[in-house]
Image (cartoon, coloured by chain):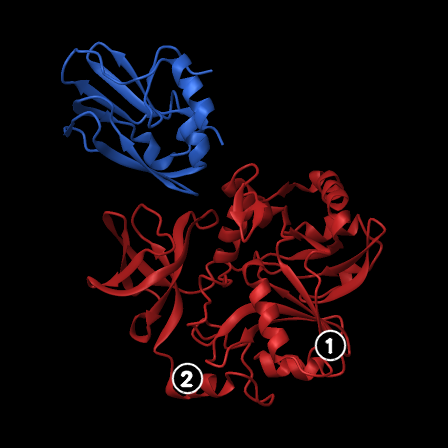
Chain colours: A red, B blue
Amino acid sequence: MVDFAGWEMPVQYAGVIEEHRAVRSQAGLFDVSHMGEIRVHGPEAERFLERNTPNNVAKLDIGRAQYSGLMTERGTYADDLLIYRRGETDFLLVVNAANRHADLAILEQRAGLGVTLEDLSDQFALLAVQGPKAEEIVAQLTSDPIRELRYYGFLEGHVLGAPALISRTGYTGEDGFELYLVADQAEAVWEALIASGASEGLQPAGLGARDSLRLEAAMALYGHELTEEITPLEAGLGWVVKFKKGDYLGRDVLLAQKEAGLTRRLCGFEVVERGIAREGHEVLSNGELVGTATSGVWSPTLEKAIGMAYLPAALTEPGTPLEIQVRKRRLAAKVVELPFYRRPEA
Amino acid sequence: MYPTDKLYSKDHEWIQIKGDVCTLGVTHFAQEELGEVVFVELPEVGQSYDAGEEIGTIESVKAVAELYTPVTGEVVEVNEALETAPEAVNSAPHDAGWLVKFKLASDAPPEGLMSAEEYQAFTEGEGS
């Protein structure tokens, strides 16, 4: 167990590689109850979120979720988050555990009349069932039409008879569901999923597999690929950043950056020699320091050490040779295209 | 549970001496703490080391551990099978997952090592 933003969380159950492969080939079950949930509602809720996030909230339908960020005035993210639209004027933000209190403080400071905020984090438990067998497994515990949900769609129904928000989302690069449960129901649902999922190969999975799965899928982790010093454009999240939706905090900075062109960009690399590059290791080009690894893991799918780093624009082409300082050794590496892994078409 | 034909170090290495050749590996406790091993970096055959010197590294999914030799001697063989199958360090740390064989520089018994029973007690103190 490790401490993660005040939560005692397992790094692994059976082993990181085994759990990782279970998610890619069958299914894995994650307890991600540490995530924060903040309800934003009221007649001004949509406009409030539009002014504080770069994605288009007005276009978000009820029953859909959207990946976005909480903007700073410098065009960077105070946090990345999911926005669920539960009603015309009722939204749920899902935020990172480490940022929950800071996010809430920012939102409270910026919210005016017509916007009500509620921190529901302690009321929700969150279980994620991820992998190609996820639909079969979750369908056994609910009579709601979860098979009809599209990616990033959700419904408010029941799991094991208790109220639940069931969302076709995840952080692994696989198909899967996230189940937002009343906190005291989580244990029963966990047990039921483990029991009914066993025949489908479901395995409990910890933080270690969560990290290697999201990294193979090139999904950013706040505090690593995203910080208050990095814009979403640099992070490869241009698809989230909308310029035609009206003004929002940091838009002018993002627009200027887009027009001037990016000087650095998030890139993927793989280590060519034997060794694992990890977060914080220096990245060099022809002996000169050009960046720092934001994340690095052993990829069970590729059976290679992979990672991400911010690199100067001139070094972002796939195939560009790099070196990574791994303790006393300088290992050959090269830029590769992101994501490292894309799930096969169903 | 630790084999009694071996001696154990506080750095969680084991050694087994036969004549003037000493085989070295890491213990079951070490491999459990490390988790799944993906790379093993071993010394070159022919290199000599003093007791206490770093001779290589073991890298797992979770962490990196330096390898130290508790004996003084010359490397006469390394477990090359670990290059393609490093997981043997996890599955058979006391047997197929051995790491290095040394030719001992002297026949004086190595110092500061523990018996199987002592090591067992030592790990119970360190357990997580």
Marks 1 & 2, CB-CB < 8 Å contact: no
Please report the residue visible at 51 percent of the width from the left and 85 percent of the height from the top. Answer: A251
Q: Quadrant of the C terminus of chain A?
A: bottom right
> Which three-letter amino acid code belongs to the residue tagged 1?
Asp
Residue A23 position in % (x across, y down): 59, 48
Q: On what subunit does the disc labeled 1 rest?
A: A
Please report the residue visible at 38 percent of the width from the left and 34 percent of the height from the top. Answer: B86
Residue B88 visible in the picture: no
Q: Secondary structure at mark 1?
A: loop
Disc on res. A84: none
Q: Nearer the viewer, residue A265 or B12?
A: B12
Disc on res. A257: 2
Mark 1 / mark 2, whichever is N-terminal: 1
Residue A325 position in % (x across, y down): 27, 54
- Alpha carbon separation for disc pair 1 and 2: 30 Å
Give the side of residue A96 with respect to residue A339, left or right: right
Disc on res. A61: 1
Residue A120 position in % (x across, y down): 71, 62
Rendering quarter of residue A91: bottom right
Query: Residue A142, relative to residue A59: is it above or below?
Result: above
